[in-house]
Amino acid sequence: VYAEKAIKYRNCSFRIVGEKRKTTNVEEEDEAEQWTDIERLTEMGIGSADIAKLKSGGVNTVGGLIMQVKKSLLAIKGLSEAKVDKILEASKKLSTCGFQSGVEALEKRKDVVKITTGCKAFDDLLGGGIETMSITEAFRE
């Protein structure tokens, strides 16, 4: 399924054609994973008392826990450094988000396609067209 958008501006007519994507179940699962309740840490061997301490410190989701720096977790009363390390390790096992190497990022860049605008001069300014998987903003002063 393709989406087409025609734009006319001054002497150039733009016709942008791109593939229309449907959200896949995997993408929906990844989005839902961000909001995984912190209670799921009990499945990984974290005690409910420690989870209650995290909640009292304002941490309610696994995604929110992963975004915390260790220092802020140590500031929560009743959590030792060993407990914080164990909690962070368990939360990383529950989540798929995290570090991406340069090689992995380069592999993703191979999927980038340039879409022509229909105006050669504008395409040349953009380095061959509008890149997919990015935001392109054009304006004039």
Image: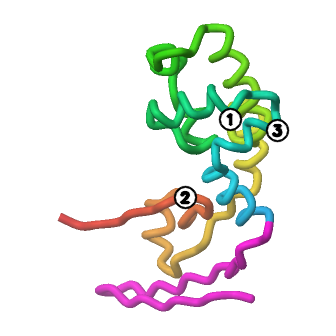
- Three-letter code for the amino acid on which mark 2 is drawn: Ser
Residues shaded magenta: 1-25
Question: Does residue 22 belong to the magenta stretch?
Answer: yes
Residue 72 badge: none
Residue 43 badge: 3
Label 3's element? helix
Residue beneath the point at 55% across and 58% down: 134
Label 1's element? loop
Marks 3 and 1, the one that precedes in the sequence: 3
Residue beneath the point at 45% across and 30% down: 57
Give the labeled residue for mark 2. Answer: 134
- Three-letter code for the amino acid on which mark 1 is drawn: Gly
* Residue 96 falls left or right of residue 63: right
Q: Nearer the viewer, mark 2 or mark 1?
A: 1
Q: Nearer the viewer, mark 3 or mark 2?
A: 3
Residue beneath the point at 79% across and 69% down: 25
From this viewpoint, is residue 102 visible? no
Question: Does residue 132 belong to the magenta stretch?
Answer: no
Instruction: Tell me whether the residue at label 3 lies in contact with that at label 1, contact meaning CB atoms closer than 8 angstroms.
Output: no
In this view, the residue in front, 67 or 121, is 67
Marks 3 and 2, the one that precedes in the sequence: 3
Give the labeled residue for mark 1. Answer: 98
- Three-letter code for the amino acid on which mark 3 is drawn: Glu
